[in-house]
Image: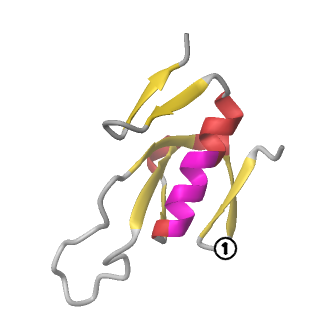
Amino acid sequence: MSIFCVIDEKHIPLYRVMWIASLPHFCGEEDCQCEGRYEIRLEQGESVWGTGDERDAALAALERWQGGLGSNEEDGEWEADT
């Protein structure tokens, strides 16, 4: 298992990921380069922007990397395995 996920053609170490947006970015600015992409916030205030597939792959990689966490498919929330 790799400790990296690929987002926007960059290999990001999973341990640098602080949070991942649930909704795509929308600011309404004409020159925005990130419209419709998902922000993946990294440590030290950095961000990368990924597609929906990249976001889902990053979430899955974090789940595998951390281990022991599972999906509660009934309500779409994540919970710790006991």
Residue 37, quarter of picture: bottom left
Residue 7, quarter of picture: bottom right
Which element is circle 1 on? loop
- Residue 67 drawn at (x, y percent): 67, 27
The answer to whether residue 63 is seen in the rendering is: yes
- Relative to 5, is 22 on the left or the right? left
- Residue 23 drawn at (x, y percent): 29, 59
Q: Please tell me whether residue 7 is drawn above or below residue 36 in the rendered image.
A: above
Q: Residue at x 54, y 30 (%)?
A: 70
Q: Residue at x 34, y 53 (%)?
A: 22
* Residue identifier under label 1: 9
Q: Please tell me whether residue 70 is drawn above or below residue 51 in the rendered image.
A: above
Name the amino acid, label 1: Glu
Q: Residue at x 48, y 53 (%)?
A: 46
Locate the C terminus by quadrant.
top right
The stretch of residues the image draws in magenta is 53-60
Q: Please tell me whether residue 32 is drawn above or below residue 64 in the rendered image.
A: below
Q: Please tell me whether residue 25 is drawn above or below residue 17 in the rendered image.
A: below
Residue 33, quarter of picture: bottom left
Instruction: Based on the picture, tell me whether residue 80 belongs to the magenta stretch.
Output: no
